[in-house]
Amino acid sequence: MTALDLSSPVAVVGTGTMGQGIAQVALVAGHPVRLYDAVPGRAREAAAAIGARLDRLVAKDRLSPAERDAARARLQPVDSLAALADSALVVEAVLEQLDVKQELLRELEDIVGDACLLATNTSSLSVTAIGGALRVPGRFVGLHFFNPAPLMPLVEVVSGFATDVTSATRAYETARAWGKTPVACADTPGFIVNRIARPFYAEAFAVYEAQAADPATIDAVLRESGGFRMGAFELTDLIGQDVNEAVTHSVWRSFFQDVRFTPSLAQRRLVESGRLGRKTGRGWYDYTEGAERPEPHTADAAEPPAHVVAEGDLGPAGELLPMIREAGITVREKDEDNGTRLVLPSGGHLVPADGRTSAEFRDVVHFDLALDYRRATRIALSASQDTSPQVLAEATGLFQALGKKVSVIGDVPGMIVARTVARIVDLAYDAVAKGVATEEDVDTAMRLGVNYPLGPFEWSRRLGRTWAYSLLDDLHLREPSGRCAPSLALYRHAYATDKRETAS
Ligand SMILES: NC(=O)c1ccc[n+]([C@@H]2O[C@H](COP(=O)([O-])OP(=O)(O)OC[C@H]3O[C@@H](n4cnc5c(N)ncnc54)[C@H](O)[C@@H]3O)[C@@H](O)[C@H]2O)c1
């Protein structure tokens, strides 16, 4: 099955933000494109807006004037759906409302030929439910572009329950021919990206709700330690708190209120207060004229310890040992497995973030996961109120000696980056086990759709087979709501093979 022929007409219905972007993509790829919108005059305005964007591409040398002129000649706003009769593909990008989309598609089905592929750009509705209105639902598929469509490479190609393999394959190949990176996915709430990305927001909000750190500190740790391009608070301010919360609610409701997708009360209050983010001048942060951006917590300078003893396998934090030596601090490695930790001169322990609290132990300071300890510019530490100040000062001095800023946060199990990554990894294993997509497509989707520095499976392989499971297992024990409970899929990944080997 091949992509649609470039000579075949593509129609876009609904010419708002997404419709215009999708139309531009199909147009620049070489198709004749028709635009239709329910509001009279809007399709014509959209054609003018696309034309202006093509001019900008010419100005940036990304399109030749001749290509622009040819593209413009291929673009046609129309006044009625009947004018779309000879389309080979119709993509709808109308209002995100089931009955509106169903009614439109029913009408379209009576106009276009039986070979015409019908697609929806819905981001939260069920493709199966929309397609349920059709006489021939097999030719209906989800083509989920990301905003802005001309720039974002990812397209989730969503197969509804009744979608034919041939239709899904044709849509996939067509998206690829348009220069996009398609991923195939089943029709489940949030598809790939909006499902697996939920913990990125939820864990940051949970740490904030636990009063363990403020938004500026959590964002700084996610960026400077976790390697994420933006923190969860600044990103949701950019997206719009109402928009981000609506996606969370939709996924949660669609999973019959699965506790793992529980929305955040703190975000609810923010939305209720009308602080929707940048667009209203205020969200988690204040964007009004002259407002100062709050600084993350950064610890004062402290004396580094003269020596540490490394016990047990530090896992991903093992890369710290050569760095500590390079900083002139003596490291003695002890083979016996007494747990995983760095023993400080005061006798206190520095332990990589796991699912436990510092309060459970005497003089333990936890340090958060970093994407890359060498490149991280900030590290979060957590201590309990009973941890001796000297132990915390030694731990702070140690990381400062490695050139890191240190943020001290409250005693939450899994800290910030570690719990976020563990939950993303868990949802990724769960999604693949439930047939949503392949591991490779999940990694591609999370890197390209939400700019994660690594795909969840790549990240999991780096962290080790049991890392995410044991963190969440411990975290779930301490927060037994079920919100952070590890999935069976993650358990199987972590342990099932070992058990089978033992049993045989
Ligand atoms: N905005 C995003 O970031 C984004 C990202 C991915 C997917 N989506 C999805 O894309 C779709 C469109 O979103 P948008 O942000 O472009 O919306 P928008 O409000 O910018 O545009 C919607 C357009 O559809 C038109 N319309 C409404 N009902 C219609 C009908 N029955 N027939 C023809 N035209 C109709 C409206 O007049 C409007 O011009 C939604 O399903 C949305 O969930 C949006």
Image (tube, grey):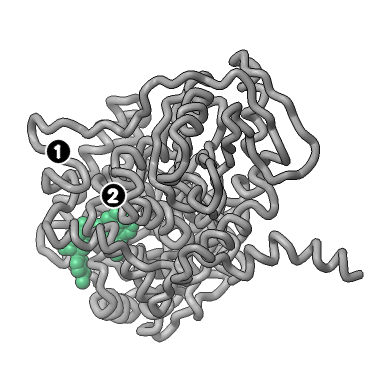
Residue where numbered disc 2 is placed: 236
**Residue 2: image x %, image y %?**
57, 58
Identity, as a three-letter code, of the amino acid under mark 1: Tyr
Identity, as a three-letter code, of the amino acid under mark 2: Thr
**Residue 470: image x %, image y %?**
62, 57
State the residue in front, 52 or 194: 194
Q: Residue at x 44, y 21 (%)?
A: 302
Q: Decide: marks 1, 2 in contact (CB < 8 A)? A: no
State the residue in front, 308 or 223: 308
**Residue 323: image x %, image y %?**
62, 22
Looking at mark 1, is its residue's CB closer than 8 Å to ligand 1?
no
Residue 376 vertical placement versus 49 (above, below): above
41 to the left or right of 132: left
Q: For residue 237, which numbered disc appears in the image?
A: none
Residue where numbered disc 1 is placed: 287
Q: Residue furthest left?
A: 289
State the residue in front, 109 or 462: 462
Q: Residue at x 23, y 76 (%)?
A: 100
Q: Residue at x 48, y 53 (%)?
A: 413
Q: Is residue 153 visible?
A: no
For mark 2, give the secondary structure. Answer: helix
